[in-house]
Image (tube, rainbow, N blue to C red):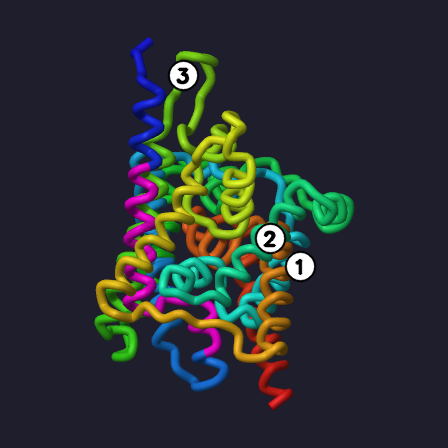
Amino acid sequence: MQDIDMAALGHQVLWAAFGLSFVLGAVAQRTHFCTMGAVADIVNMGSWARMRMWVLAIGVAMLGFNGMVGLGLIDAGKTIYASPRLLWLSNIVGGFLFGFGMVLASGCGSKTLVRIGAGNLKSLIVFLVMGLSAFATLKGITAVLRVNTVDAVSVQLSTGQDLPSLLAVSTGMAKASLALWIGGALGLALIVWALVREEGRSQDVIVGGLITGLVIVGIWWVSGVLGHVAEDPNTLEEVFVGSTSRERMEALSFVSPMAYVLDWLMFFSDKRKVLTTAIVSVFGVVTGSGVYALATRAFRWESFRTTEDLASHLVGALLMGVGGVVAMGCTIGQGLSGVSTLSLGSFIALASIIAGAVACLRWQLSRL
């Protein structure tokens, strides 16, 4: 067995994850990459520019992930998104709650972190409430409710819920080949749709979509290839160094990681609380956004205007924290990382997030 310095490898994984998330934060600050904003632009103004940016990112992430699957570098079945248990009701309910909440809170989890970096104190409050409600839904009072209600409704599949695994059973084709064909076809179709109109070929759309998608691919490589150890010298088991569970590789998501950040900060003296890819990615996005905002003199302190504004953000943060955990991800976690694996649950969660956002936007318009 080859000797592996697990500590050194862990540092490499964490620094790589921090660097990639730093880039994501800077690019999001530069291009205004925001899923909630993309949906709001369509509903309120009929503009599809930012939606094309997001779809371009999905297409790039899908191509990159499934290209690595086709090359045998990673396996979708070793992610949380492609397990055989399809929690379809959790994906629907959690996704809708998250989508509704992100409109009330003026942005999703990643946008919240980007705004914190640029001096938005409202987003700092959203982060704290979102992190606490996410932690409660992971291990606390709402976790009990989650497990006994929506999580109790599921479909147990004979294989992973990613499309290549499902089709491999019925067609007899190799899963790696199917990943290349399906991921390649869907990814290219999304990229073509994003770029076919002039509004999708602006500098911001191309830079924001392309780099965001590549960051997701990069995180998958860091977690699934660089951090993958077939046989841990300490336990003799397969591990993914730096991942939260160590049993599965992971990419970016920003709901549960906020809870992990609060847990790490509050129990810092507990040596069992170690840094993970999820935790450092939160710091990376905030730092990247902050550096870019300071460098371009875009940093501005901003706070709540009215009591109603505060109440809206508090409720939105609560819904995002609960909904994001129930749905197993946010607009980045399910909408980019999860969808790139071609997981059925991720497609369901993504559709529900968009539905929740549209419902809230329509509700807000009806109040005006």
Residue 231's disc is 3
The residue that mark 2 highlights is 327
Disc 1 versus disc 3: distance between alpha carbons?
Answer: 38 Å
- Tags 2 and 3 touching, CB below 8 Å: no
The vertical placement of 259 against 158, above or below, is below
**Residue 82 x %, y %:** 52, 41
- The image quarter in which residue 320 lies: bottom right
Of 176 and 313, nearer the camera is 313
The residue located at (54%, 61%) in the rendering is 125
Contact (Cβ within 8 Å) of mark 1 with mark 2: yes
Secondary structure of residue under mark 3: loop
Indicate whether residue 43 is drawn in magenta: no
Residue 206 lies left or right of residue 57; in this view the side is left
Kindly identify which residue carries mark 1.
93
Estimate the spatial distance between the alpha carbons at disc 2 and disc 3, rounded to whole Å.
32 Å
Q: Secondary structure at mark 2?
A: loop
- Whether residue 23 is in magenta: the answer is yes
Q: Which residues are magenta?
A: 15-40
Q: Is residue 223 left or right of residue 355?
A: left
**Looking at the image, can residue 352 be seen?**
no
Looking at the picture, tell me which residue is in the foreground, 247 or 127.
127
What residue is drawn where x is 62% and y is 40%? Answer: 85
Toward which corner of the image does residue 309 lie, by quadrant? bottom right
Type of residue at label 2?
A: Ala
Amino acid at the residue labelled 3: Glu
Mark 2: few, some, or many residues within 10 Å (few <14, many ≥20)? many
Residue type at the position of mark 1:
Val
